[in-house]
Image (spheres, grey):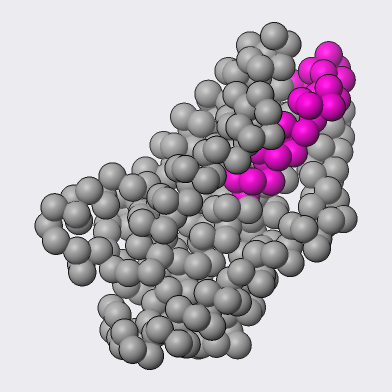
Amino acid sequence: MKNSEIWIAFYTILVREIRRFTRIWPQTLLPPAITMTLYFAIFGNLIGDRIGEMGGFSYMQYIVPGLIMMSVITNSYSNVSSSFFSAKFQHSIQELLVSPTPNWVILLGYVLGGVARGLFVGFIVTILSLFFTHLALENLFLTVLVVCLTAIMFSLGGFVNAIYARSFDDVSIVPTFILTPLTYLGGVFYSIDLLSDFWQSVSLLNPVLYMVNAFRYGILGVSDINIYWALVMVSVFIVVLFWYGLRLLNQGKGIRS
């Protein structure tokens, strides 16, 4: 394919993915906004006043970056996993695979569609959070970099999940039993400094902890972990997941078999 044709194919996939979640916004954009508003009201206002400060900030300010990141993670992941599996289920993905479109273009189109939804929801949650507390942006570049890298990483994870999934139940297994526990135990609602030495060491095995803390550092300037190590870790995960997803797509894993 010519470069112009590759660009057209990529643009078409990306626009279709964006139109997919914006067309059904009551199902894709409204629920996370309502859920996060409840988190702000219950954990931030009602419980936060009793907890007091954490990391030198009010409890509401402390948890907001984690809640924003949680919405980005879950929505970028679920968008790709559900969209690509639906294409498999309806057998429409075969039309793309038999076309001259390179597989890396297909992968990139789906992934960036998930990134778009994750960032869109993250932006909505950020705006809603401003009605509950004040956020001081410490480092704009780091904040944008971390949220984009995180959305890319979990979009790739959703793509791999969709390839292996054989039913709609399989699509929900990973978010329910792996993604949700990792997110809740990833320092969204607390600082790992509150934990014992043993559980602090265990928490360091959770990749979500690094993303949440890096994002929190970009907004508030506080973190429980090394920021540079967090960026390296996320970048490595992205490279590995992109390579693995492309390899599965080239093999036709779960698609041609």
Residue 160 percent coordinates (x, y): 58, 30
As drawn, which residue projects farthest toward the bottom? 49
Please state if 29 lies on the left or on the right of 154 as rendered: right
Residue 108 vs residue 66, the one in the foreground? 66
Residue 183 percent coordinates (x, y): 44, 55
Residue 144 vs residue 119, the one in the foreground? 119
Q: Is residue 101 magenta?
A: yes
Quadrant housing residue 8:
top right
Tell me the residue at 38%/90% (across/down).
49
Above-or-below relation of 222 to 60? above
Above-or-below relation of 221 to 10? below
**Residue segment shown in magenta:** 76-102
Q: Is residue 121 magenta?
A: no
Quadrant housing residue 60:
bottom left
Residue 8 vs residue 110, the one in the foreground? 110
Q: Is there any visible trace of residue 163 in the rendered image? A: no
Residue 246 percent coordinates (x, y): 61, 23
Q: Quadrant of the C terminus?
A: top right
Q: Is there any visible trace of residue 93 in the rendered image? A: yes
The prevailing secondary structure element of the residues shown in magenta is: helix
Tell me the residue at 14%/61% (across/down).
196
As drawn, which residue projects farthest toward the front? 169
Please state if 247 lies on the left or on the right of 120 as rendered: left
Tell me the residue at 66%/72% (across/down).
34
Tell me the residue at 53%/67% (across/down).
68
